[in-house]
Image (cartoon, grey):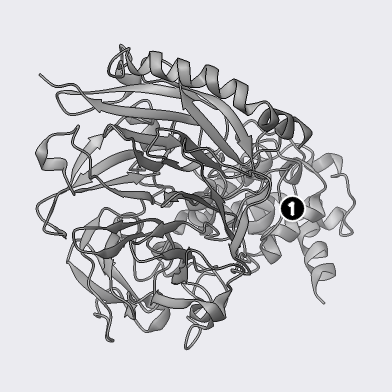
Amino acid sequence: MKNIVALIGLTLCGLSASAQKKPAPKPKAAPATAVASSAAIAEGKAIYTQNCLSCHQADGGGVDGLNPPLIKTSYVLGEKPRIVKVVLNGLQGEDIDGEPYNNAMPSYDFLTDQQIASVLTYVRNSFGNKAAPISAAEVKAIRAANKK
Amino acid sequence: MKHLLTRYVLLPSALVGSLALYALTSKVGPPVPDADNAGLKLPAGFGALKVVETGARTRHLTITPQGNIYVKLNRPDKTGKSILMLRESSGGKAEVAGGFGNYGGTGIAVKNGYLYASSDQEVFRYKLDAKGEVINPEQPEKIITGLINRRQHESKSVALDNSGNIYVNVGAYSNSCQIKDRQKGSLGQQNCPILDSAGGVWQFRADKLNQTYGDGTRYATGLRNVVGLDWNTQANQLFVMQHGRDQLHDIFPEMYDVKQSALLPAECMYALKKGDNAGWPYMYYDGLQRKKMMAPEYGGDGKKEATGNFIDPAAAFPAHMAPNALLFYTGTMFPEKYRNGAFIAFHGSWNRAPEPQAGYYVVFQPFKNGKPAGEWEVFADNFAGSPEKVASGRADHKPCGLAQGPDGSLYVSDDKMGTIYRIVYAKK
């Protein structure tokens, strides 16, 4: 736990500069954040282990018919708002790339913007995935738009 | 559709051929185990073969007295069929002889000249002819309809008794009836409303059309999800295998560590009487302490025992292994100790992670006079392919269904690769 807090601190420092430069999110990440920082990846892995691993598994492969894989799916690699909203709102009853997964994913809106950014950056750059990182500012804007 | 009609118009002439073939193969002698016993690890004297590799999502399976194998698919296959019919070819193997039905599902059973099969909200039946073949595959009778299907725990597994009743699992569409399903810290809903129409086993008549909840009886409640169930003719009683609740640590990390969460709760076998309550979601069974524990969603703290009139399990097995099939063995091929005992197919765990996964095997629970007697043992192992594949959960095959052949062979279906196994005992 202490490690996570330390990592959050580190990552916040690293990302706050770019976040300030670009407060309004754009679909494409700004060049400054195009490559995921190792700190964000490390923090993201810790958050993944704590919150995601029991369903999506250590290798991101999910569970047949129950919990979707996070390996090269359109959800993981696609537009940022959709995957951020899955974390914020949870997901149930939707097929992922044509496959049904019947478990319910709860909401993880208790995670901070930075934690969601880091865990999704980790997921988008692990398990064979390669996609642009997600910043805390982007999560913040999506969260604001997500509120009814 | 047209193809099927053509096939059945042509049936009489084809039948002559297949009957001749059957007569020939039945003279070939007993089934021949594969050189590697189909990759399985079995007790001494047993052998196994791969009957057929369908590549489909084969859930439960059943076998007619004539030896025809019917397999229920979780989703229709590439040709749109959701029930496969297999016919024995040679050496104990079989080939896909036909398919019908356009609805995915799990349950399938043969009883008194009918084939019963379920979607995730209905149960159908098909009349069988004297050869054990479905007479009208495109026009089944719908005997039960309108059962709840909200994706989670959707399998409507079935079993029949000897008094004209059919028992149907209606799994709870929830992990533990929280206000917010699987949400960290969310408490349980008071008087869990799910139990009105799910989280139990319902009893219906096996021969009455279009029954829904009002026509049936909630036979037993407080059962989270029962994928494997079977009628025990010695005890004249329904036995079920419950899938125990998930994610104690994820939801209540301050009460359960990762290891406890992997080892709790037990996967329980229950012997049911009408009106029984097995306690979900208010309790779970701790197989290590052998106690009924109050669920943390309902005031439990990992130490408080449950209060309430809940039945005890008849037997308890390690956590999270997902018992997907239960079969009481009534054959004579296997040695005496197996007679009237229970085989259970454990599909394999997932929410033991990050601890190693477990299961992916068929176990045997000895019975005496209709009650569990003695310790269970692993009967058929290595469906996964290796111990590493068990630990990671990346199993090659996942046992899902069990059936007994007319000769007493034990058949196992796998819904990962669609392989059908046949386990035989080779007499000394």
Q: Residue at x 36, y 41 (%)?
A: B403
Q: Let me know if residue B221 appears in the view.
A: no
Q: Residue at x 69, y 49 (%)?
A: A14
- Disc 1 crowd rating (10 Å Cα; few below 14, some 14-19, many 20+) is some
Q: Residue at x 55, y 46 (%)?
A: A45
Quadrant position of residue A105 = bottom right
Instruction: Give the percent coordinates (x, y) of residue A74.
Output: 76, 41
Instruction: Give the percent coordinates (x, y) of residue B135.
Output: 59, 42
Quadrant position of residue A72 = top right
Q: Which residue is mark 1?
A: A83
Quadrant position of residue B211 = bottom right
Q: Is residue A72 above or below residue B225?
A: above
Locate the C terminus of chain A by quadrant. bottom right
Q: Is residue B312 left or right of residue B128?
A: left
Residue type at mark 1?
Ile
Locate the N terminus of chain A by quadrant. bottom left
Instruction: Give the percent coordinates (x, y) of residue B116.
Output: 51, 52
In the image, B39 versus A88, the foreground residue is B39
In the image, B194 versus A59, the foreground residue is B194
Q: Let me know if residue B92 appears in the view.
A: yes
Instruction: Give the percent coordinates (x, y) of residue B79.
Output: 71, 32
Subunit that carries the residue with mark 1: A
In the image, B418 versus B145, the foreground residue is B145
In the image, A71 versus B215, the foreground residue is B215
Q: Is residue B89 above or below residue B274?
A: above
Q: Is residue B2 left or right of residue B7?
A: right
